[in-house]
Image (cartoon, rainbow, N blue to C red):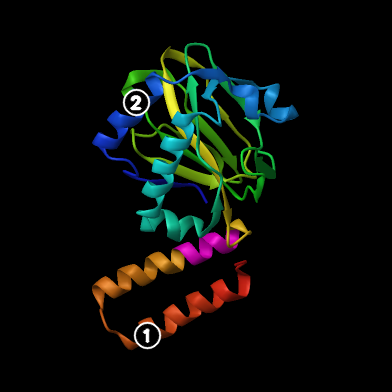
Amino acid sequence: MLLQVPQVLNAEELARFRARLAAAAWVDGNATSGYQSAQAKKNEQVAEDSAEARELGDAVLAALGRSQLFFSAALPKRVYPPLFNRYGAGMTFGSHVDGAMRVHPPTGQRIRTDISATLALTAPEDYDGGELLVEDTYGVHSVKLPAGDLVIYPATSLHRVTPITRGTRVSSFFWIESMIRDDAQRSLLFDMDMALVRLNQQTPGHASLVTLTGCYHNLLRMWGEA
């Protein structure tokens, strides 16, 4: 499932992020790459252990905690502390699949990467190129987000970032270990949850809502990993 989550960050938060990142020290993006990705990756990122990465990463996690849509779609068990990257003119990231496991160096915490996430910090009109292309059985999906929006998609997907031809693209990126490992099961639960929300708005108090909510939670109990 590929899903856009709108307005994870508001205008005031975006302004603060941009000011902090403008003053940050940027390093080679391959600092966090595996062997395969390192051959395709040409970008920069804020050092993972820097004060800016920790402060802004915590702010991203707090923003995610306010998003019911994100929770419903991802059903997060653990979120890798958010990182920050930058693509300038000529920079790109070729086709790759994200590594299955990641270890957070400062803490030693290991997470399974079920879901990949990109949070846009730059307005799309401020740069050309830089589209995120995600491949699945239905073809190639091109994503270029408004600033403050998030996209999540299965980490098993082949994906790439097209070369920047003008301006600079700045984003936060991270991975989620979900309570539901299987993407098809997550998608089914998400569709059921969204249908329950709509039914509750249209027919509040209907007796069938209790039954359907029970079905949702019993499926979550059957498939989930606490």
Secondary element at image label 2: helix
Three-letter code, disc 1: Ser
**Camera-nearest residue between 207 and 74:** 74
Q: Residue 153's x, y, as percent?
A: 53, 46
Residue 124 seen by the camera: no
The residue at 37%/72% (across/down) is 196
In the image, the segment drawn in magenta is 184-190
Three-letter code, disc 2: Arg
Asked whether, in this view, residue 204 is left or right of residue 6, the answer is left
User: Which residue is under mark 1?
Assistant: 208
Q: Residues within 10 Å of mark 1 (few under 14, many from 20)?
A: few
Compared to residue 37, the image places residue 43 above or below, namely above
The residue at 65%/37% (across/down) is 105
On the image, which quarter does residue 99 sit in? top right
Alpha-carbon span between mark 2 and mark 1: 47 Å
The residue at 42%/53% (across/down) is 70
Q: Residue 34's x, y, as percent?
A: 71, 31
On the image, which quarter does residue 139 sit in? top right
The residue at 46%/82% (across/down) is 214
> Closer to us: mark 2 or mark 1?
2
Compared to residue 132, the image places residue 65 above or below, namely below
User: Which residue is under mark 2?
Assistant: 18
Task: Name the quadrant of the C terminus.
Answer: bottom right
**Tag on residue 136?**
none
Instruction: Looking at the image, tell me whether mark 2 or mark 1 is earlier in sequence order.
Output: 2
Q: Decide whether the magenta segment is chiefly helix, strand or loop.
A: helix
In the orientation shown, which residue stands out farthest toward the right? 35
Residue 217 seen by the camera: yes
Whether the magenta-drawn stretch holds residue 188 is answered as yes
Asked whether, in this view, residue 190 is left or right of residue 42, the answer is left
On the image, which quarter does residue 180 sit in? bottom right
